[in-house]
Image: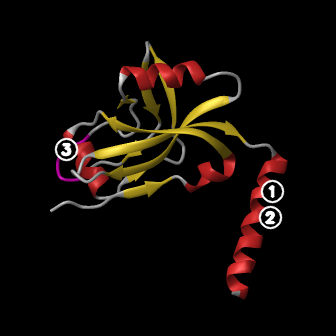
Amino acid sequence: MKTSINIINKKVKFEYEFIQTEIAGISLKGSEIKSIRQGKVSISESYCYFNNGELFVKSMNISDYGYGSFHETTRDRKLLLKRKELNDLESKLINGLTIIPYRLFTNDKGLIKMEVCLSRGKKLYDKRNSIKSRDIDRDIKRNE
């Protein structure tokens, strides 16, 4: 029995402009996997950083499973990407760009994956434009 998980950080699309996306595996412990399958995870405050050529996600909160096994809820977790993908992301990480976790999901095989995005922070006028275009699209769909 595979449970489908799809946890999206909705705030990211409003705050950042996506440049490139990658799908990465995550290095997790047993009770963390069980907690994620129950949906007890939050990626709203998390971000990614490089340490010695490896990519880590920081402050992703995975609550305790609750059946006798406990783990650190906000420890740094290693993201699993191929060396070529890591080098590509690290070389593109220049002024104003950051790597943000956007989505946590299970793939067809039942493995837990994370979609990370190389992104640039939006300015205030960009946010206004995205709100305006979203409102226009909503009005067009209502009138159809």
Vertical position of residue 3 compared to residue 95: above or below: below
Percent across and percent down for residue 135 are: 75, 71
Give the number of the disc on residue 69.
Answer: 3
Percent across and percent down for residue 81 are: 37, 29
Residue 125 is left or right of residue 77, and the answer is: right
Query: In front: 129, or 27?
Result: 129
Label 3: how many residues lie within 10 Å, few (<14), some (14-19) or many (20+)? few
Label 1: how many residues lie within 10 Å, few (<14), some (14-19) or many (20+)? few
Of pointers 1 and 3, the one earlier in the residue sequence: 3
Q: Residue at x 52, y 52 (%)?
A: 9
Quarter placement of the N terminus:
bottom left
Percent across and percent down for residue 126 are: 79, 49
Residue found at the far front of this picture: 144
Residue 80 is left or right of residue 46, and the answer is: left
Q: Residue at x 19, y 41 (%)?
A: 30
Query: In front: 56, or 139?
Result: 139
Give the number of the disc on residue 132.
Answer: 2
Give the number of the disc on residue 10.
Answer: none
Identity, as a three-letter code, of the amino acid under mark 1: Asn
Q: Nearer the viewer, mark 2 or mark 3?
A: 2
Cα distance in 3D space between marks 2 and 3? 48 Å
- Circle 1 residue: 129
Q: Residue at x 70, y 23 (%)?
A: 95
Range covered by the magenta-colored residues = 66-70
Of pointers 2 and 3, the one earlier in the residue sequence: 3
